Image (cartoon, rainbow, N blue to C red):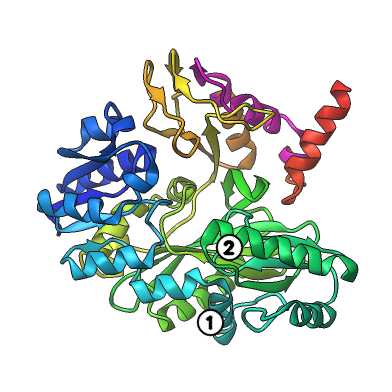
Amino acid sequence: MFKKILIANRGEIALRIICACKELGIRTVAIYSEADRNSLPVRFADEAICIGPPQLGLSYLNIPAVISAAEIANADAIHPGYGLLSENANFAEVCETSGLKFIGPPPEVIRLMGEKEKARAAMKQHGVPILPGSDGVIASEEEAREWARQVGYPVIIKASAGGGGRGMRIVRAEEDLVALYRQAQQEASAAFGNGDLYMEKYVEHPRHIEFQILADEHGNVVSLGERECSIQRRHQKLLEESPSLQVSVELRNEIGDVLSKTLSAVGYRNAGTIEFLMDQHKKLHFIEMNTRIQVEHPVTEMVTDVDLVKSQIMIAAGSKMQDVLQGKVVHRGHAIECRINAEHPEKFTPSAGKITAFHPPGGTGVRIDTAAYEQGTIPPYYDSLIAKLVVRGKDRNEACQRMARALEMFIVEGIHTTIPLHRRILADPEFLAGKFDTGFIERFLGKKAELVG
């Protein structure tokens, strides 16, 4: 087992990794920017090293500074968390050449799954269901037109190196194709330094469902079931739950088996998430893979009692799957996670500043992942996520009731948060009935605007 792990991240995920390391008896090193000097990860890590000013490019995304900190602290492994450098194959490669274990997949697998058209081809080769679309990157506007005619409108153009909805355009008619193709290409180039695009059939009113997997370094891959992630705004998830009401036991087992075989074949290791769209016929179609721990990993932890972060560390240290899981994975009850962001709950504009009051809820079946605290400051430089409120109930009805109660008792003052939005979602009849898709939030906010008008 590792003696010391450097955590190449910040906020609640850095604190989450510190907790896992403490339970495994591993010392931790927190890195921090000048803006995070008074953060809880800095307080609770065994060691802390400042790596630069607040700007991401000069601190948390500065690979030489991160590696230097690990070498100064004599760490033997680096956990990247999510976001930042977590899916950066070059960073994983530098870790390896520096004699540091990267707690994640090998660099070549990160690259394979990071280029979405290559990931799509790999999944198709091994029998994972995918949407009809282009064979790889589209070379020209004319080729885009030809593929659109073959696939049939509507189609969706996506950035090969993209994520978060950037470099993505829905095309419903041929006369709109060229303009939207150029927009997507320009946006992808600006966001990712790579303007490559590919095309898929666009699914109307889909549900967004993802599967959590663990893979050890001995070829064993296990699926831990699915999470429903359809409550999202502009491709940014707001609320997740498990299990999905739309996934039968048979479908869960079928997809889990094919994913286990596929990821073993491509040499995948550590934790990962495979994302699908479900059409109106309840058929799943692969869209992308995230080669890291997810923001919403506590949802799976709550229904399986598997500590995914500890599992990541044990796998990276060479443990076999049977030692990591210690028995068959059993799903119990229903879990829901609400992402609490420092944002205006209707305008979605960032809300940085000092937290003047902070009272997280408690009680049976309630979990809070956060690095926020009263009199703490939310800096304006980073992601707006400040807490993850997670509950588990014996069934979905109890989980919804528990979440509504927990949201009501969650007090954050001094900044705006999305708590009021989540409270309204948890009271919505369509959400409570499970009648939603990825367009739910836009319709939900539209209905509220009509009522106000």
Q: Separation of disc 2 and disc 1 at Cα?
A: 24 Å
Q: Quadrant of the C terminus?
A: top right
| SS of the residue under disc 2 | helix
Q: Residue furthest top?
A: 356
Image height of 341 relative to 147, above or below: above
Q: Which residue is mark 2?
A: 189
Residue at the image point whose x is 58% and y is 47% from the top? 241
Residue at the image point whose x is 18% and y is 49% from the top? 69
Residue 110 highlighted magenta (yes or no): no
User: In which image quadrant can residue 63 be found?
Assistant: bottom left
Q: Is residue 13 left or right of residue 189?
A: left
| SS of the residue under disc 1 | helix
Residue numbers of the magenta segment = 406-431
- How crowded pointer 2 is (Cα within 10 Å; few <14, some 14-19, many 20+) is rated as some
Q: Is residue 93 left or right of residue 373?
A: left
Image height of 268 relative to 420, above or below: below
Residue 122, numbered circle: 1
Image height of 146 relative to 327, above or below: below
Q: Is residue 433 visible?
A: no
Marks 2 & 1, CB-CB < 8 Å contact: no
Q: Position of residue 393 (x, y in %)?
A: 54, 38
Q: Position of residue 44 (x, y in %)?
A: 22, 33
Q: Position of residue 153 (x, y in %)?
A: 85, 71
- Circle 2 or circle 1, nearest the eye: 2
Q: Position of residue 374 (x, y in %)?
A: 38, 17
| Residue type, numbered disc 1 | Ala
**Closer-to-camera residue (52/405):** 52
User: In which image quadrant can residue 154 be found?
Assistant: bottom right
User: In which image quadrant can residue 49 be found?
Assistant: top left
Image height of 399 relative to 453, above or below: below
